[in-house]
Amino acid sequence: MIKEETLPPVTISANDYDRLAFLASFGLSTLQDRAAAAMLANELIRATVLTPRAIPPWVATMHSRLEFRDDVTWDVRRATLVYPDEDNGEEESVSVLSPEGAALIGLREGQSITWRTSKGWRSLTLLRVLYQPHGQFVEPWREIS
């Protein structure tokens, strides 16, 4: 049996979408970030874009504090999803222009994503969104006053 990439639905804030699209296109032009940028671009193509108030608190957005598991090694990590210029290189942050960051953006708690790398298969599961910076969640079908 051939293993296929597992790509769950993703949700992106309208505020984050434009900056992420720029990063993905810029990253595609650099050798260092090309693979992660391509992955981020593919995530954006598949994304449902919502207003910040419509983003549920269980969705990974930029500046979310996340708990996630590497499904290959079973290591659990907590980190904040940041833009590349905010990445301090410490364990406590993960750049959206890294394979892990591009995989996590837009996931909901409990979702997993699997992708192929040059070294084999990778898989991450978003366990919990510990902090989500978007405003008060308003269900999209309710009238916003």
Image (cartoon, helix red, strand yellow):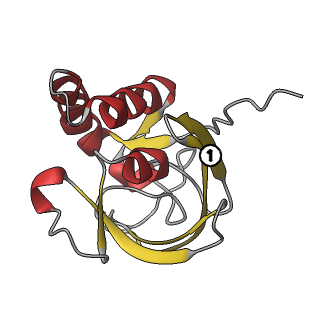
Q: Which x, y percent locates residue 11? A: 49, 42
Q: How many marks?
A: 1
Q: Is residue 98 left or right of residue 50?
A: left
Question: From this viewpoint, is residue 54 visible?
Answer: yes
Q: Which x, y percent locates residue 19? A: 18, 37
Residue drawn at point x = 48 percent, y = 32 percent: 47
Residue drawn at point x = 33 percent, y = 65 percent: 135
Instruction: Residue 8: name its quadrant.
Output: top right
Residue at the limit of the structure toward the right, as seen here: 1
Question: From this viewpoint, is residue 144 visible?
Answer: no
Residue drawn at point x = 52 percent, y = 41 percent: 119
Instruction: Residue 79: name its quadrant.
Output: bottom left
Q: Is residue 44 left or right of residue 123?
A: left
- Up the image or down, 46 lies above or below 119; here it is above
Residue drawn at point x = 34 percent, y = 51 percent: 52
Q: Secondary structure at mark 1?
A: strand
Q: Is residue 133 left or right of residue 110?
A: left
Of the pair 83 and 51, the residue shown nearer to us: 83
Q: Is residue 89 left or right of residue 104?
A: left
Q: Which x, y percent locates residue 77? A: 48, 76
- Up the image or down, 138 lies above or below 115; here it is below
Of the pair 115 and 80, the residue shown nearer to us: 115
- Up the image or down, 61 lies above or below 135; here it is above
**In the rendered structure, which amino acid carries the disc numbered 1?**
Ile
Which residue position is annotated with label 1? Answer: 113
